[in-house]
Image: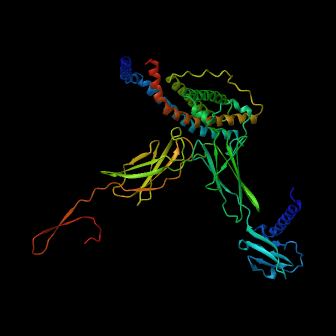
Amino acid sequence: MANPVPSACCVVLAVVVVVYAQRHSQQDSHIQYERVGADVTMKCGSMDWDAAVTWTANGTDIDDSHLNGSYLILKKVDLTQSGQYSCYEGSSWHLKYQTYLRVGVPPKEPVLMCRSNNYPKGFYCSWHLPSPTYIPNSFNISVIHGTREMVCEKDIFPKNRCHIRYLQLFSTVKYKVTLTVTNALGKNSTTLTFDEFAIVKPDPPESVVAKPVPNNPRRLEVSWQNPSSWPDPESFPLKFFLRYRPLILDQWQHVELSDGTSHTITDAYAGKEYIIQVAAKDNDIGTWSDWSVAVHATPWTEEPKQLTTEVQITGETLTQHKHPALRGPGYG
Amino acid sequence: MDFRAGDSWGIFAFLCAALCNLPTVPALNGTEELGAGQSIQKTYDLTRYLEHQLRTLAGTYLNYLGPPFNEPDFNPPRLARAERVPSATVDLDLWRGLTDNARLAANYRAYSRLLKYLRGLDGQVGTVELRHRLGHFCSSLQGLVLSIAGVMSSLGYPLPPPDPRPSGTPAAPNDFLKKMDDFWLLKELQTWLWRSAKDFNRLKKKVPPAVVTLRIEARGL
């Protein structure tokens, strides 16, 4: 049988170490959250009011005028006063208390948006705060459909986004999404209520390509693809909206296309560079997507022919010079 | 050896004969095939037209019912009572897996019943304008029911039997619940019209080859 005395000593030693560490760490890990404009009073741990202490802010000594006995008074704090505050016993310079002050504001009403870009699979919601709070916030989202509470799975990226899969399609009951944002100084929330059909908005079309058509100075051939996030274009077809204009004009021309992923523009101005964009929408429900990335194209123009000019040199015979035309103004 | 070779030649000859006959088969029934496809397109167009009409009708009717029914965020719980109206809501995989027959039959049954209830509304509503709109909508909705019936018969599907339940519904115990019934009727109608657009989209893509196969099978080739 092992000797119990050395093991008992180990246990006692371990307990002493833990208690000592805890007492010391209590001084280090303290965080304090305060509102902008508030008056803050910090006590130097367990020291008496009339003890002689020195306070520092981020290592810099604080003037005695801010002290009331051993308490530190900060009036109407602002964001610049966030930092580490430490309190040292007067003569021994022992660290008696330490806290990290974070000055911030309670959250304003958050901005919430929900959208189905992958109908009929489901939808996602994303949110943000209209202005910063300067302190950590936590978000909680709840989705209620009739009597059922659904789980919105948080996305890893981007943050502040979650997604839900539809269990049923063609629902008559609205979805109610509530987002609550909480921090150490307060909380706020916002709610969205919507029908399944109202939030359908595809992503813009992809791989938009515009090409000139050989021997056709007024045509441009445009083609694109369904957005890759749209899962089932066969059963849920998309329709498209094309807009185009020459760079030199402000007015767009529009074409709506109920099927197909290509279109030929036949009224382009010859020789002018065009800017072209496409948007998508479910054939029957929801709203138009954002415009696709813009593509540029210029209709086909004829190769400039070789020009011949006659140059008369005084007193001598006519000479013919051939100039390749339209090289540029600097051509001599 | 010889037997097998002869057999394959026989099959080959048979296939040739069948293939030669194929062009004539669709041609003979060409109008019917085109008929089904065109009917489906017409039915699809009708659902879109009705959905558009319903927006105006529902707006007027809900205003007539008054608050809270005409508030955009009004989101009441579904009472058991409201289940008398056929629901468009369906599990996604189930909806995808519906046969053409089942898909059409569901639409036919739904609109037949919705039409009955809408007609029941007719005599009770307040303004002349509202009665006029309702009447017009009911006529269009009847057109939709007939159109669906046309598609079903051109594809050889039997029409679902008429609903044995009485057309009159148990009277609502009070005025508020009566209005709730009306609210859900309009909601369900709106949802069905959204769903039908998707149903007929699927049918548009699937039907023509099925028609050709049906005809060949019928001829025992």
Q: Where residue B11 sits: x, y (%)?
A: 39, 20
Q: Where residue B181 sits: x, y (%)?
A: 71, 34
Task: Tell me if residue A21 comes above or below residue A288 in the rendering.
Answer: below
Residue at the spot 31% in from the left edge and 51% down from the top edge: A214
Quadrant hosting residue A103: bottom right
Task: Tell me if residue B24 comes above or below residue A159 in the rendering.
Answer: above
A11 left or right, relative to B19: right
Task: Tell me if residue A61 comes above or below residue A129 in the rendering.
Answer: below
Q: Colour scheme in the image?
A: rainbow
For this rendering, which residue is in front, B187 or A32? A32
For this rendering, which residue is in front, A241 or B6? B6
Residue at the spot 83% in from the left edge and 66% down from the top edge: A17
For this rendering, which residue is in front, B178 or A85? A85
A69 left or right, relative to A168: right
Is residue A214 at all visible to an observer of this figure?
A: yes
User: Count the marks: how many?
Assistant: 0
The residue positioned farthest toward the front in the image shown: A1
Quadrant in which the C terminus of chain B appears? top left
Q: Where residue A111 sits: x, y (%)?
A: 66, 56
Is residue B128 at all visible to an observer of this figure?
A: no
